Amino acid sequence: MPVMKNSKGQLTLYALACGYIELSETNNIRTKLWLEPGSAPYHVRQHDFNKHERVFWECFETLTEARNYFQVKSK
């Protein structure tokens, strides 16, 4: 059985490649991290559903960069 989460509870590269999405939501502000099927970049996007607008959508070449950005912005 493939491992879908690492020891920190984050989705593994395998899980992201299979289409899983890392998600964080606080106060109706949703932050997502995902990988386009088959290739980089990794996407990190945030929506504010209180204001009905996208806050940002950033792309990264490495999972480490994307995870670091996701962790900072999802707090």
Image (cartoon, rainbow, N blue to C red):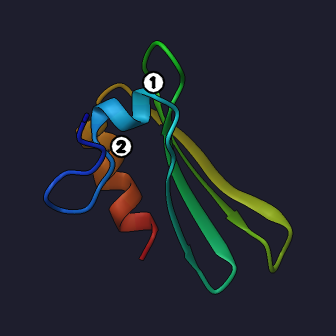
Residue farthest to the front, as pictured:
1
| Residue 24: numbered disc | none
Q: Residue at x 28, y 53 (%)?
A: 68
In the image, residue 73 lies at what x, y percent?
44, 65
- Taking 67 as reference, is 38 left or right? right
Query: Residue 52's quadrant in the figure?
Result: bottom right
Q: Is residue 75 left or right of residue 62?
A: right
Going by the numbered disc 1, the residue's amino acid type is Pro
| Residue annotated with mark 2 | 66
Q: Position of residue 61 (x, y in %)?
A: 35, 25
**Measured from the top left, where is residue 45 in percent x and y?**
59, 50
Q: Residue furthest bottom?
A: 27
Q: Is residue 50 left or right of residue 58?
A: right
Give the residue number, with chain letter if any, for mark 1: 41
Above or below for 64 versus 52: above
Where, quadrant-wise, is the C terminus in this rendering? bottom left
Q: Residues within 10 Å of mark 1 (few under 14, many from 20)?
A: some
Q: Nearer the viewer, residue 43 or 23?
A: 23
Q: Where 26 falls versus 61 (above or below)?
A: below
Tell which of 33 and 56 is nearer to you.
33
